[in-house]
Amino acid sequence: DRIEIELPPPPRLELRPEPIPLTIVYEDEDLLVVEKPAGMVVHPGAGVSEGTLANALCFYFQQLSAVGGALRPGIVHRLDRETSGLLVVAKNERAHDALSEQFSRREVQKFYRALVIGEVTPREGRITAPIGRHPVHRTMMTVRPPGQGRDALTLYRVIETIGDFSLLDVEIKTGRTHQIRVHLHALGHPVVGDAVYGRALWTKVRDPVLRQAMAQLGRHFLHAYRLGFRHPRSGQKLEFTSPLPEELTAFLALARERATSSAA
């Protein structure tokens, strides 16, 4: 006997334009630089089909690079959902190819502000641990033994120690998934508010007021504040900066206030 099974065609994947407000830092005929807010996914995937940066871009711009596919118009690089900050978007294939080449050659300058738990020592360093998929929790990443993950390079510098926190300036030379969060967690200093990597270490924050504020932050304390690259057409060096969002500035102010009062 022969059994025939007729499967329905897979659902057609379409990007629905949505009038989501965008903060555009810079725009010309080849590219734009936008500030992504925390809580926004860059493009559809893994059960997310709306409310993404790609949905917004599709609404406001008819002409964007299609190199990344229909669901990723103009998308050259990404930020995690809860990470805010600067992203460059390509308007045409030429710009997309040129920018992607700069990313692959590690020529793009990507700097972040991160507030982490604990006093980080040494105050300046390089983290080179390879990163790969977690063997058990498949939605998570983790540091892996040499040869079992992709190479990753994170540079950090302590700007300020604030009670049980350290404010870091972080530069990444590679762009692995969750790279900064995974590397800092492996260092024993998870990013403040990161509910995925290092929540068990939140108890290291001794002040109950700050622990509660951290739980109520609604995001992790990671902001892509500086982005530098060469213009894909002219070759001119471009650099953009973005201030800390209000909720992160407020948390920093509270942490400084509590640290000062406890030291008095």
Image (tube, helix red, strand yellow):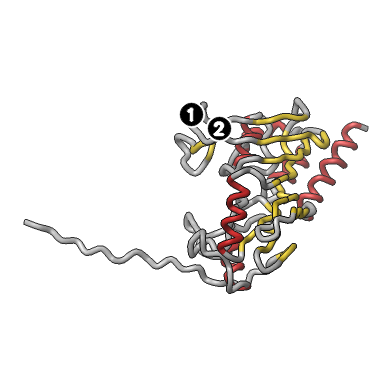
Q: Decide which of 253, 183 is in the foreground and name it.
A: 183
Quarter of the picture containing the C terminus is top right
Q: State the CA–CA distance, disc 2 to disc 1.
A: 8 Å
Q: Please name the residue shown 85% across and 41% down the image.
A: 256
Q: In which quarter of the image is residue 114?
A: top right
Instruction: Give the structural element (helix, strand or loop) at label 1.
Output: loop
Residue 130 marker = 2
136 to the left or right of 206: left
Q: Is there CB contact under 8 Å for labels 2 and 1?
A: yes
Q: Quadrant of the N terminus?
A: bottom left
In the image, what residue type sits under mark 1?
Answer: Gly
Q: Where is residue 80 in the image (x, y as percent from the top left)?
A: 61, 50
Identify the disc placed on residue 147: 1
Q: Position of residue 65 (x, y in %)?
A: 56, 64
Residue at 56%, 72% in the rendered image: 17
Q: Decide if residue 207 is in sight here.
A: yes
Indicate the secondary structure of the residue bearing disc 2.
Answer: loop
The answer to whether 187 appears left or right of 15 in the picture is right
